[in-house]
Amino acid sequence: MVQGTVTPDNYLVNKDSLKITDVTVNNKKVRLVRKPDGDCIEEKVPETEAKAQVLTEAQIVELAGYVKKLEEHYGVYMDTELALDERTNKLWMLQARPETVWSRKNKKQPRPGSEEKEKMAKSESAKREVVARGLPASPGRAAGKAHIIFDPKDIDQFNEGEVLITTMTTPDWVPAMKKARTIVTDAGGMTCHAAIVSRELGIPCIVGTEARSEVEATRAIEDGQIITVDATNGIVYNGIIEDLVKAKSEETVAGATAVAEVFPVTATKIYMNLGDPDLAEKYGSLPADGIGLMRGEFIWTTFIHEHPLYMIETGRSDEVVDQLVEGIRKVCQALAPRQVVLRLSDFKSSEYRDLTGGDKYEPDEPSALLGWRGASRYYDPKYLPAFKLELTAVKKVRDGLGFKNLQIMIPFCRTVEEARKVTRIMCQEGLERGLDFKIWLMAEIPSNIICADRFNQYVDGYSIGSNDLTMLVLGCDRDNDTVQNIYDERNLAVRRSIRHLIEVAHRDGKTVSICGQAPSVYPDFCEFLVRSGVDSISVNPDAVKNTKKMVAQLEQRILLDAMTGRGKAESTELDW
């Protein structure tokens, strides 16, 4: 569904009466089937099943009841995922998190029901030329020139402010999506790639026009045609519909005057993870205490796309520095004066090879995940010139542009000797630890935990990379489905490792953070971290608000336990 390979059925249920008001049954041409050995294969769906309704009416109503209870529990509109056990016909709720668009709107302004939408659609159709209909994946309205593209290799032809019309998007399409005024696709459902990314970018999007229109959008709309996309109701009109565009502007003004949500202050800082620098301004208004993990390699994939050594060889070192500076600046400026921790580039050799010119400089490693990556690159004479360009960019942002909120983090540092070598190179390049410049270490290898008392002399703090740490502590490949039943950040060995690091780091006045989704996904793991004294937690942008509220409640409960003597036995069992 996310890739748009299959357009799912769509069921609309009245929230008050729990009556089904609209059902759209789509043609599901393929499906994934699990084999006895655990692998999945794609197979064609028999025609009688492909066009059949997936859920029964009783299951739809049951599911709607669960969703309603989740919304009442969390107090906001929720984005949920489910599974149906075909052996027992039992529905299981797998995930629930705040929905990214309607959850931010005024709840006193209800979302249009099926009857209201039908009336609106008929009224609009009577006066205006409807060229396509689809699912309103990301609400909003916009008008512009349609640009039809079928292949991501042609996205360089797409211009800023155009309307992107295509069959379906994948990650390769993101550069064009960022420039689009709005997006319309032939295939896809509410959880497809186009829908998710459009909501992230905050632009209107309609998907699944093939199922909802007589002719899909790529055939119904002409390349260069001026259209109005009403993604709030899932309708595409010919020409510019002035009152719809005007209504969109008025919505924006009204939204700007909304009362800001108030969040509690927590002793445990809540940071945010960030990949794309272009999203820094958008997420800068979130109640995060700063950026706990800015992935340096994302600047390469977003702005540069070429191997650093290839650019040095072709005489473009200054170009590398300038583009790194611009990417880092965007984040530091959007978050200032809050702290931004830049994790220096941590591509694996296989990922570096994918950059233009990378074949010449990268080894062919059988296990790139455990190969030439992180700190081991920085002091290697073969890669050192490229590392120095990163350090030059950091220094320019801090000293040249004055963003002293920028700190840096060393990833995948296997030995204390590596930490000594890398920090010495930093010092030689003018980046010496001090009151306003901190160096963090990514704690993701057991050696970082076992020798923390030695690593302490070279860093100011740690950020626990729970994904790699869990993999290496348990000897369990996190990308291998066969052993996924073992891989768990909450495993006792992992928790003992984290607790040991916090104790040893605090003994020498060092801070400890954790970056990853585990604290926001597992409340018990978050409680373990807070009770263990972790200094900060860094989560993805969509989890910042909920995590901050959850941590505030935990801190209050822990304080009450300390005052009354309650909860001591429970915390001991939880921690160890």
Image (tube, rainbow, N blue to C red):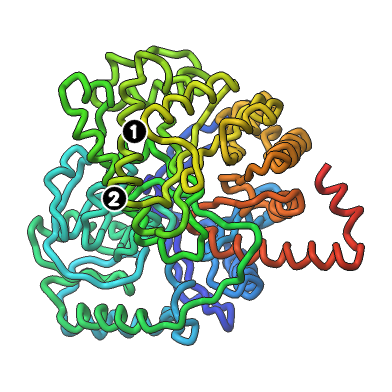
Give residue 473's position: percent from left, percent from top. 69, 28
24 relative to 361, above or below: below
Q: Residue furthest left?
A: 224
Kind of residue indicated by mark 1: Glu
Q: Between residue 26 and residue 535, name the one nearer to us.
A: 535
Kind of residue indicated by mark 2: Leu
- Disc 2 target residue: 401
Using the rendered image of the protein, determine whether residue 346 is visible from the camera's viewpoint.
yes
Which residue is rendered at x = 71% and y = 54% of the image? 530
| Mark 2, other Cα within 10 Å: few <14 / some 14–19 / many ≥20 | few
Q: Earlier in the sequence, mark 1 or mark 2?
A: 1
Give the Cα distance between marks 1 and 2. Answer: 16 Å
Q: Image check: 222 left or right of 320? A: left
Using the rendered image of the protein, determine whether residue 36 is visible from the camera's viewpoint.
no
Q: Image check: 109 left or right of 317? A: right
- Disc 1 target residue: 390
Q: Which mark is residue 98?
A: none
Q: Between residue 398 and residue 59, name the one nearer to us.
A: 398
Give residue 314's position: percent from left, percent from top. 16, 21
Q: Quadrant of residue 427?
A: top left
215 relative to 469, above or below: below
